[in-house]
Image: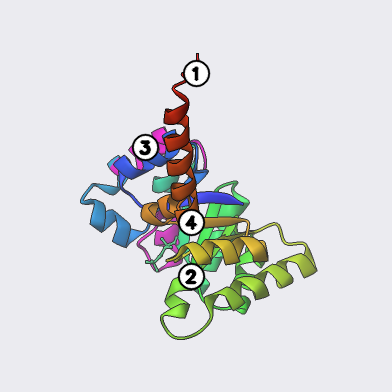
């Protein structure tokens, strides 16, 4: 399973990238707002840090303008993945831009039928939003499960990018189901390593090692 980091915070991206933990980045207009940076400038900086796909989202809602904005974003770097909303115009733009060889991430997916349409439109990634469904008392993981079955039934190559991940259990469940990618906030990526028995075990090993009076090397 690939890990993308869901942020436009360059400091976090740099740190996680140095740890070798991330395969790409996803941003959205809300994350750009949170970063307080200019979209072109911050996206360029992110693309210089990370080799994998960096999703940058269009703000337009109509086809012609989506195409124009998508092409502007794609010029930022070779690893840009154009992020388009799951609307009819977005799907049409997905067909055009993917047909021209651009990587496309279709975002704001909340149903299996939407995911089916995105795959038929040639999306590179489909982004089903788990956390926002959970917020409405609908199990977001059921959506990942349904999309996995549908994509496998028909051999679609569109990758399932589990998004709106809020917990470490979301990551585990999405991995068990077979999502291709999870885009995860920086704090949740860091939480994946934590286990109290690891901390306790390490503490005991270090205490015993001290008692040996030895040094390695
Ligand atoms: C996906 O690409 C989105 O950027 C993101 O996962 C949305 O997450 P949220 O529901 O926590 O805002």
Q: Which tag, 1 or 2, sits closer to the chain's start?
A: 2
- Which residue does the image show at 35% across and 62% down from the upper left? 59
* 216 relative to 147, above or below: above
Asked whether mark 4 lies closer than 8 Å to ligand 1, one says: yes
* 40 relative to 106, above or below: above
Which residue is label 2 attached to? 129
Which residue is label 3 attached to? 14
Task: Give residue 30's position: percent from left, percent from top.
Answer: 30, 62
Does 32 sit left or right of 156 as displayed?
left
Task: Give residue 16's position: percent from left, percent from top.
Answer: 41, 41
Q: Quadrant of residue 91?
A: bottom right
Asked whether mark 2 lies closer than 8 Å to ligand 1, one says: yes
- Which residue does the image show at 65% across and 73% down from the upper left? 145
Observer-nearest of 187 and 205: 205
Of circles 2 and 3, the one toward us is 3
**Disc 2 versus disc 3: distance between alpha carbons?**
25 Å
Observer-nearest of 174 and 37: 174
Which residue is label 4 attached to? 183
Task: Give residue 38's position: percent from left, percent from top.
Answer: 24, 47
- Which residue does the image show at 33% across and 49% down from the upper left? 8
> Helix or strand or loop: what does disc 4 sit on?
strand
Q: Which tag, 1 or 3, sits closer to the chain's start?
A: 3
Which residue is label 1 attached to? 216
**Disc 1 versus disc 4: distance between alpha carbons?**
39 Å
> Helix or strand or loop: what does disc 2 sit on?
loop
Q: Which tag, 2 or 4, sits closer to the chain's start?
A: 2
Asked whether mark 1 lies closer than 8 Å to ligand 1, one says: no
- How dense is the environment of label 4, judged by Cα within 10 Å: few (below 14), some, or many (20 and up)? many
> Helix or strand or loop: what does disc 3 sit on?
helix
């Amino acid at each position: 399973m690939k890990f993308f980091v869901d942020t436009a915070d360059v400091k976090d991206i740099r740190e996680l990238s140095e740890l070798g933990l991330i395969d790409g980045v996803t941003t959205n207009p809300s994350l750009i707002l949170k970063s307080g940076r200019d979209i072109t400038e911050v996206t360029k900086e992110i693309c210089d840090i990370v080799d994998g796909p960096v999703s940058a989202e269009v703000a337009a809602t109509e086809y012609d303008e989506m195409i124009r904005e998508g092409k502007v974003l794609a010029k930022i770097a070779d690893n840009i993945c154009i992020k388009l909303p799951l609307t009819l115009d977005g799907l049409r733009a997905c067909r055009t831009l993917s047909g021209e060889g651009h990587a496309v991430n279709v975002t704001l997916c909340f149903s299996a039928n939407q995911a089916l349409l995105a795959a038929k439109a040639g999306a590179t990634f489909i982004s089903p939003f788990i956390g926002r469904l959970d917020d409405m008392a609908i199990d977001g993981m059921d959506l990942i499960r349904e999309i996995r079955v549908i994509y496998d039934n028909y051999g679609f190559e569109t990758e399932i990018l589990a998004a709106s991940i809020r917990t470490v259990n979301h990551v585990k469940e999405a991995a068990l189901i077979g999502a291709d990618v999870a885009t995860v906030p920086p704090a949740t990526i860091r939480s994946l390593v934590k286990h109290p028995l690891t901390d306790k075990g390490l503490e005991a090993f270090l205490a015993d090692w001290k008692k040996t009076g030895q040094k390695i090397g």
